[in-house]
Image (cartoon, rainbow, N blue to C red):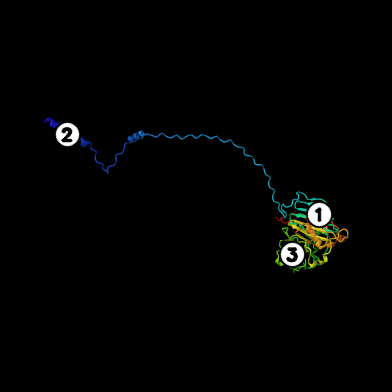
Amino acid sequence: MNMKRTGLILLIAGFLLAACVQKPPVDAAQPTPAIAEEQIAIALTEAPTAAPTIAPTPTPTATPAPTDTPTPEPTDTPAPTPDGLLGGDYDGFIEGEPVLSEWRYQSERVSVEVTRYDSSPLAKHLVYYVTDIHVQDIEALRTASWDGKFSARGKKPWAKVERMAQAEDAIVAINGDYYTYHEKTGLVIRNGERYEPDPWKPWKGHQILLLYRDGSAEVFESDSFDPLATDLSNVWQAWEFGPNFLDENGKALSTFDKSYNDIARANPRTVFGYYGPGHYCFVTVDGRKKGTTDGLTLAETAQLMESLGCVIAFNLDGGQTTQLYWNGAIANEPFRGGRSTSDIICIVEPHADSADPVE
């Protein structure tokens, strides 16, 4: 009996012990108990730590030795582009004071060289002078009259070429177109001023040479020229005589308007030659001296001017009027000593107060 009671007691005690250790159901409303900080610390401490990867130390590269940088060679400072009509296309100018020799004059902006010829490209006796002219300023190419005012047209005022040239302090000079001879006709513009009669009356059959402020030149037929329809504001000089001896290609003409018939035979000649802006020539042909210098016909003068390479060659008054002034005196041998006239064309040193040179 006692053994049975003892077994029953043990059985009941086992059931009670099992009930005590059974987990209670989880209540979703109840918070999850916090883990103590000590437990977290222990967990972190005890967690295995991966060994850090050691970055490889880069192998140092040798610093390249500095190379010597070559010092650049100094370059010459470029010369400023010359201004003026010729720019840098002519090297005959000189710096400093002008230099005058027997047949040449040079300065900073003017170069003049006179050459006398006593032979000819033509088969005849001939003495002539070619004055080669280079100027940077159009102001260097001037005209002058018997009274300095280009007045009294038609009243036959005369003055010596030498006197007019000296009054202008000219380096070189030639006679002009004898503007007073063509009374009440033609175009006269001198040094930028206009003097022709009003109303306009052309010199029938003749031609006009216009020289512009930029140094360029053109030839027009007087009969068809209309000054009212032409911009003359940039004209520096205008001469009316002619003929022009060359065609548009610089070739010699052989025939001319009948208005020139009375001067077509061999005569002393005065010609203004044009090569380009800033480059001109004066040609002075002595004549009417049999066996020494016969002069040239119009057609022969055309051949001479072509041989000189001119683009325009404009005939001015000739005969006894033909004169070349150089170095203070008349250099050629004019027929019968020459005669007085109304005007000249001359080369001078540009005035200090002149307009700025054309560029």
Cα separation between marks 3 and 1: 29 Å
Amino acid type of the residue that numbered disc 1 sits on in the rendered structure: Val
Label 3 – label 2 distance at C-alpha: 153 Å
How many numbered marks does the figure carry?
Answer: 3
The residue at 72%/66% (across/down) is: 227
Q: Are marks 1 and 2 in contact (CB under 8 Å)?
A: no
Q: CA distance from mark 1 to mark 2?
A: 158 Å
Left or right: 175 in relation to 357: right
Marks 2 and 3: in contact by CB < 8 Å? no
* Residue 114 disc label: 1
Q: Which residue is outermost to the front?
A: 123
Q: Amino acid at mark 2?
A: Leu
Q: Which residue is mark 3?
A: 220
- Depth order, front residue of 170/136: 136
| Image quarter of residue 38 | top left
Image spot of residue 180 (x, y percent): 80, 65
Q: Quadrant of the N terminus?
A: top left
Mark 1 residue element: strand
Residue behind mark 2:
11
